[in-house]
């Protein structure tokens, strides 16, 4: 797995280890963290290496049956600041993963794509047959990576599946980085009695998806026959505004919310909400954990971590 030291990757590593799979992680720990794998270190082979190096990726791919490609620079604002590095890691890095998989006779590559490929045009909820129209350099990079996955399934004997994740949240997500996502930021701020930063009017909608649902989609995408070349939304199929998210977290924590209104962020989409029929039909997958249950589980994780710190 690439990016196994990151938020989603480490949750997926844990699930694979619990199933009894042998797992090798390739990560340069730039946005991920070794502590995410601390409890699993005896069960996982960790290779520190760079996605931009074909040699490193190739060496890490030897003897592998399925590659879960989670490694990327995953932030919209980071991509606006530095589109070149985002593209090098997300596009060239994905090409290295696909080439190494092809060269090593890997059966299937399951690739993390993103709702950011949709942009603002077209109807809601977003359906996979809609024309992609990304706004940010990050969205462009994920679209290019995803199209390389589809292309490789057409021109080489390599199976690929691309999963478009929508606003994933849960344990091991970093609440402190400059590019931290909204759910861990809100949980830690509200729990500490600090104001939450809201970009724009807070009425933008998102399909917030608990990480366990994403882990299960990955496992099914690796195992289900006859789905090579597919591109699938992975989300809950429900939309929530950022203001509603803040209120729900506050009520779970038994706190009130203080809002700090900030300018809208360049590159952000207005509304994001998925149609998840295709993944249901092709993978037999269900987003089992809804928003509120997921937020309770995530809050438990972050509060426990703060208590231990
Ligand atoms: N979190 C979300 O809401 C979300 C939504 C849509 C798509 N995604 C995609 O899911 C995947 C995982 O995202 P995440 O939220 O877990 O992010 P993350 O930053 O926690 O994980 C990414 C991992 O990739 C590693 N990495 C980054 N650059 C690398 C490089 N050059 N070489 C080797 N390893 C490198 C990082 O160290 C990190 O461990 C990414 O592909 C991201 O684009 C995430």
Image (cartoon, rainbow, N blue to C red):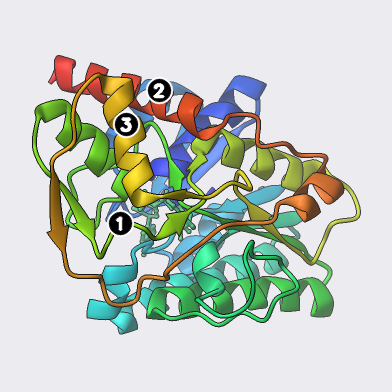
Q: Residues under labels 2 and 1: Cα distance? A: 21 Å
Front position among marks 2 and 1: 1
* Residue identified by numbered label 2: 296
Neighbourhood count class around disc 3 (C-alpha, 10 Å): few under 14, some 14–19, many 20 upward = many
What residue would you read off at disc 1? 202
Label 2: state its secondary structure: helix
Tag 2 near tag 1, CB within 8 Å: no
Residue closer to the observer: 282 or 109: 282
- Numbered tag placed on residue 249 in the rendering: 3
Q: Nearer the viewer, residue 254 or 109?
A: 254
In the image, residue 124 above or below residue 300: below
- Disc 2 residue: CB within 8 Å of ligand 1: no
Badge 2: few (under 14), some or many (20 or more) residues near its Cα, within 10 Å?
A: some
Image coordinates of residue 190 in percent, x first then y, are 18, 32
Q: CA distance from mark 2 to mark 3?
A: 8 Å
Residue at x 32%, y 84% (from the top left corner): 84
Q: Which tag, 3 or 1, sits closer to the chain's start?
A: 1
Q: Say if 203 sits above or below 85 in the image.
A: above
Per the image, label 1 sits on a secondary structure element best described as loop
């Amino acid at each position: 797995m690439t990016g196994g030291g990151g938020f989603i990757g480490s949750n997926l590593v844990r699930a694979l280890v619990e199933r009894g799979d042998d797992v090798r992680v390739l990560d340069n720990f730039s946005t991920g963290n070794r502590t995410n794998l601390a409890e699993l270190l005896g069960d996982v082979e960790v290779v520190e290496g760079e996605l931009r190096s074909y040699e490193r990726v190739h060496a890490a791919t030897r003897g592998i049956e399925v590659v879960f490609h989670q490694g990327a620079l995953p932030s919209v604002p980071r991509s606006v600041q530095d589109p070149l590095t985002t593209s090098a890691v997300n596009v060239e890095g994905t090409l290295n993963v696909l080439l190494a998989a092809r060269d090593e006779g890997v059966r299937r590559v399951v690739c993390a794509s993103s709702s950011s490929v949709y942009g603002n045009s077209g109807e809601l909820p977003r359906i996979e047959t809609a024309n992609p129209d990304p706004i940010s350099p990050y969205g462009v990079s994920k679209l290019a990576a995803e199209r390389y996955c589809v292309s490789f399934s057409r021109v080489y004997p390599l199976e690929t599946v691309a999963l478009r994740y929508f606003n994933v949240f849960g344990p091991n997500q970093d609440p402190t980085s400059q590019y931290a996502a909204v759910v861990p930021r809100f949980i830690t701020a509200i729990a500490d009695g600090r104001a939450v930063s809201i970009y724009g009017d807070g009425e933008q909608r998102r399909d917030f998806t608990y990480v366990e649902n994403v882990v299960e989609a990955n496992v099914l995408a690796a195992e289900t026959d006859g789905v090579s070349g597919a591109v699938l939304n992975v989300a809950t199929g429900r939309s929530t505004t950022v203001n509603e998210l803040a209120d729900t977290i506050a009520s779970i924590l038994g706190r009130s919310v203080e809002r700090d209104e900030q300018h809208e962020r360049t590159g952000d989409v207005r509304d994001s909400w998925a149609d998840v029929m295709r993944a249901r039909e092709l993978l037999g997958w269900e987003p089992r954990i809804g928003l509120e249950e997921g937020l309770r589980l995530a809050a438990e994780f972050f509060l426990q971590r703060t208590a231990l710190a």
